[in-house]
Structure formats: C-alpha cells, structure tokens
Amino acid sequence: MTERDRQYDIQIGEDAWIEFIDLDGRYDQAVDIDGLLGELWPLLCRLETYCVAGCCGMDAFDFTPEGIAAALVDLERAQLHAACAQARKAVAAAASDVFTSNTMNHMADRRVFLQLLEHIERCLGGPQAGAAPNRR
C-alpha cells in the first residue's frame, strides 16, 4: 500500500496499522469518546509527540510499542491497565458504533477505537507489569 492508501489508518508499529473503517452515512451517529477514555488521558497526552492533534489528528500520536514504552515513564502501569480495560468496556457498551474525539481530532468506527485500546493494553503488559516483585 502507498502512504496515500494509509492516510486514514492508525499506525501502531513500523509496518502495523489499524485500518480505517468507512463511516459513510454514519457521521451523524457519532458520540463523544473523550469522557469514556477517563484516566487514560495522562498516557494519551504523552503520546502526542509528532505534532498536535488539532493539526494532524491521530497522526500526531506515537502509538508504536516504543512510543508507548517511552511515555510510561513515571506513570503507573497497573492503573493505566485498569483504565484501559474500563475504557474498552465503556466503548463496547456505548449506544453508537461511531465515536468522535475532539481532543484527538478524530472520528472512527467503534471497532477501530477498540483495536487501538487493545493495542495500548497489550503494550502496557499485564495489570502487574512494572510492579515491584513480591518478596517474602
């Protein structure tokens, strides 16, 4: 695929993408996702490294595993893992299949946002990732 073919996809790795799902005829069904992302915002804000979302939308964010790992410095992985799981549940339970984020300057099908949340959760590791070992 060419760069132009990927212009609406979300890059999550060097050669890995979450493919855009066409929203034709569904734009008016969009509901706000920003509130559903809750306590993920400290991480999401740190991922906005390439530009600002108001300019470039999702292209402003570094969703690669390396980008996520770098953004985790001084953040609690277990708390973010719980926040990610909560956000996935909230998005899955929402009344619409189309979401918009004013903060990220993006509109997408529910499946795209769920794939992105699942990717972030995988990059975070298990709920205890980064926790101190249990010593007796």
Image (cartoon, rainbow, N blue to C red):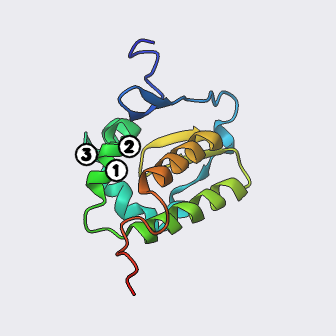
105 with respect to 82 (left or right): left
Instruction: Tell me which numbered mark, 1 or 3, is placed earlier along the sequence.
Output: 3
Could you tell me if the residues under marks 1 and 2 are in contact, i.e. CB atoms within 8 Å? yes
- Which residue lies most toward the bottom here? 136
Label 2 is placed on what type of residue?
Phe
* Quadrant in which the C terminus is drawn: bottom left
Spatial distance from mark 1 to mark 3, Cα to Cα? 11 Å
Residue density around tag 3, few if under 14, some if 14–19, many if 20 or more, within 10 Å:
some
Question: Neighbour class for label 1 at 10 Å: few (<14), some, many (≥20)?
Answer: many
Q: Which residue is mark 2?
A: 63
User: Residue 68, which numbered label?
Assistant: 1
Callout 3: SS: loop
Which badge, 2 or 3, comes first in the chain's sequence?
Answer: 3
Q: Nearer the viewer, mark 1 or mark 3?
A: 1
Give the x, y percent position of residue 44. Answer: 38, 55
Q: Is residue 88 above or below residue 19?
A: below
Mark 2–mark 3 Cα distance, whole angstroms, equals 10 Å
Residue at 40% in and 62% down = 41
Q: Could you tell me the amino acid type at mark 1?
A: Ile
